[in-house]
Amino acid sequence: MNKWLRYGLLIINLYIFAGCSEWLQLEPESQLTREEFWQSGDDVQAVVAGTYKELAGLVEELFKWGELRGDLFIPGQNISADDRRIMDGFIYPENDLNKWEGLYRAINFANTVLKFSPIVVGRDQTFDENESKAFEAEALYLRSLCYFYLVRIFRDVPLVLEASENDAQDYYPAVSTEQEIFLQIIDDLQIAVQNLPTSYAKREYDKGRATKAAAYALMADIYLYFEKYQACIDACNQVIGSGLYGLIDGEDWFMNFFPGNSNESIFEIQFDKDLNQTNLLYQMLAPYPRDGTYPDGNDEFRISPYFITEFEKHLGDRRAGNRTYLTYTGGGWYVYAASHVLWKYVGMEGTPSTVTGAAASGYRNGNQESDANWIVYRYPDILLMKAEALVQQGDFGQAVQLINQVRTRARIEPVADISNKHSLEDIILEERAKEFCGEGKRYFDLIRLGRRNNYERKERLIEILADNKSYEEAEVIRSKYSNPNSWYLPIHQDEIDQNNKLVQNPYYINQ
């Protein structure tokens, strides 16, 4: 059968199979398609590429999962009703953001590679075992990344490690605990890191495909979340010690986002408008002036003015105005006061002036084609994760040195040598907010703080989320987040209805 026809059969079959709203029914794929497809190394490579593509299709959700329940954003003019409910703390099992099917689609792609790549070695004499292991390592990395998102979003979820192949499989899996998933993904990453390359000898691949450094970065993040602090430090040291990454000059900080793939990038999901690979980040975040000027988006989410106030306490911060955010005061009948646009995914550069609609002199249009890359890990993340782990081990001096690398690059005053653990935790949390605002990390950072040491700082988490809310909104937040079960999303009702082995998060029962 022609190679391209075989590609088409597999991709069509995967998408038909994966498109069901009740993903974990796991209806089997066509055995005929599988047997005819997996014949060459090119076939394996195609499905690995498909796994990255599935992840790229989730970037809007990754933004929402990591930011909407945090404190850095407020609703924009055209936010959807479901997203507004999430931001207001009214979360129900029927909310569309509770759907996990996209992550399980990517997992199934990865599982398929892991099943069939070794078989192809015996069918294609030009495809050897080392090549197979390298592709399998990419699949393990991507599957682990998906499961790490799942446990942080939902906590206990089904752990599916086999591709759907035949009618004998269990198509209604029960949930596994987050601890079981932690053990699995760490085991997988320890295998992956042995077989992943340091470099693919092409910049877009080094930044857009799994490498050893990307695997160590993910391992560090997982270890930090699960309070394995020395293991986190060791993983960070692997990235730092490689000598392949570093902080770019502060004046060039915006180049992390446009054009992207900077020297501090470790792994980012690639988009290219010339290849018709785009996302909805610009559309979600740009203003909506209704007058034909740019930026011209949907104005779904804006940066909180309270966060802007915190940012501007350090007036020289190179990440501040016209870089992380841009103050927008014009265009459209509904704009009554300045709003603050997340500029990382809208702009082509850090502009030196405030945009006032079409009248802005020297204003360059935002990246209206919406092909900004989605950064998963970059070097300052490694420095701050290591600092956080060091604080938990009581090594405050070395932690401060790492924090100050990030602050010095931003041109703000260094932290004095602080010996108070909670103060340093708060400083790191603030630096992460400023460095990674809008990069899908804030809510997970807050939950990590709240979980730690048997919920030692739960009240601090609640205080952050309730701060700068109205009295009524703050009361809702305090009531809701006093129960740690509420920190995770419910399983979507469609999944519960289809699979009686799934157990709903107890906080959401009867809601």
Image (cartoon, rainbow, N blue to C red):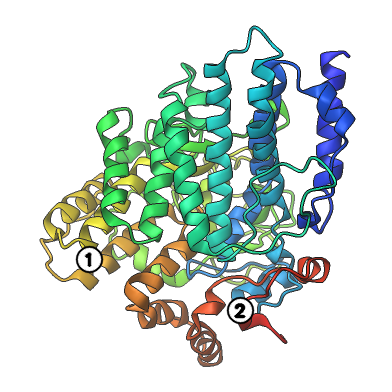
Q: Position of residue 423 (x, y in %)?
A: 22, 71
Q: Position of residue 18 (x, y in %)?
A: 80, 46
Residue that mark 2 sits on: 88
Q: In the structure shown, which secondary structural element does the residue marked by tag 2 occupy? A: helix
Specify which label sits upstream in the sequence, 1 or 2: 2
- Circle 1 Cα neighbour tier, 10 Å, few/some/many (<14 / 14–19 / ≥20): many
Q: Is residue 417 above or below residue 194?
A: below
Q: Point out the image quarter for the N terminus.
A: top right
**Residue at figure coordinates x 36%, y 56% from the top left:** 224
Asked whether 92 or 175 is in front, the reply is: 175
Q: Which mark is residue 424?
A: 1
Q: Is residue 77 above or below residue 113?
A: below
State left or right for residue 249 relative to residue 304. Answer: left
Q: CA distance from mark 1 to mark 2?
A: 29 Å
From this viewpoint, is residue 247 visible? Answer: no
State left or right for residue 101 relative to residue 446. Answer: right
Q: Is residue 39 above or below residue 457?
A: above
Q: Position of residue 385 (x, y in %)?
A: 32, 52
Q: Point out the image quarter for the C terminus.
A: bottom right
Q: Position of residue 126 (x, y in %)?
A: 64, 7
Q: In the structure shown, which secondary structural element does the residue marked by tag 1 occupy? A: helix
Q: In the rendered structure, which amino acid carries the disc numbered 2?
A: Asp
Asked whether 361 or 334 is in front, the reply is: 334
State left or right for residue 92 relative to residue 206. Answer: right
Q: Which mark is residue 93?
A: none
Q: In the rendered structure, which amino acid carries the disc numbered 1?
A: Leu
- Circle 2 Cα neighbour tier, 10 Å, few/some/many (<14 / 14–19 / ≥20): some
